[in-house]
Amino acid sequence: MKITVNGETRETVSETLGALLLELGHGEARVATAVNEAFVPAAARDGLRLAAGDRVEIVTPRQGG
């Protein structure tokens, strides 16, 4: 199915947000996520089913000044 991840259209076979994070190499990384502009807590990612056209945002924390 086609979804948008951080503004880029992607094809994925992942059915949940948790599976998508694994697919994209963020499996154990500390990231914040949102689907269709709604924040998704880490504990809810495996239960959140993705649908074609969903917009996913994955944000990684950065340090610096």
Image (spheres, rainbow, N blue to C red):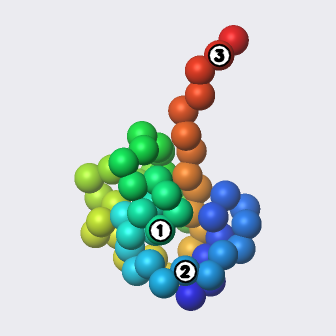
15 sits to left or right of 53: left
| Secondary element type, mark 1 | helix
Q: Label 3 vs label 2: CA separation?
A: 33 Å
For badge 2, the amino acid type reads Thr
Identified at 36% across, 48% down, the residue is 28
Which residue corresponds to the image point at 46% horizontal and 53% vertical from the top-left?
Answer: 26
Mark 3–mark 2 contact, CB under 8 Å? no
Mark nearer the N terminus (1 vs 3): 1
Report the side of 44 relative to 65 (left or right): left
Residue 25, image x and y in percent? 49, 58
Kindly identify which numbered label has been placed on residue 59.
Answer: none
Residue at 56% x, 44% y is 59
Q: Mark 3: which secondary structure?
A: loop
Q: Nearer the viewer, mark 1 or mark 3?
A: 1
- x%, y% of residue 36? 56, 64
Bin the neighbour count of mark 1 within 10 Å (Cα to Cα): few under 14, some 14-19, many 20 and up: few
Residue marked by disc 3: 64
Residue to which mark 1 is pinned: 23
Q: Residue at x 55, y 52 (%)?
A: 58
Q: Position of residue 50 (x, y in %)?
A: 45, 77
First in sequence: mark 2 vs mark 1: 2
| Distance between the alpha carbons at the discs numbered 1 and 3 | 28 Å
Q: Give the amino acid at mark 1.
A: Glu
Q: Return the residue found at the far front.
A: 25
For marks 2 and 1, give the CA distance. Answer: 8 Å
Quarter of image, res 17: bottom left
Q: Which residue is mark 2?
A: 12
Where's residue 52, x and y in %?
56, 85
Marks 2 & 1, CB-CB < 8 Å contact: yes
Furthest toward the right, the residue is: 8
Q: Is residue 39 above or below residue 50?
A: above
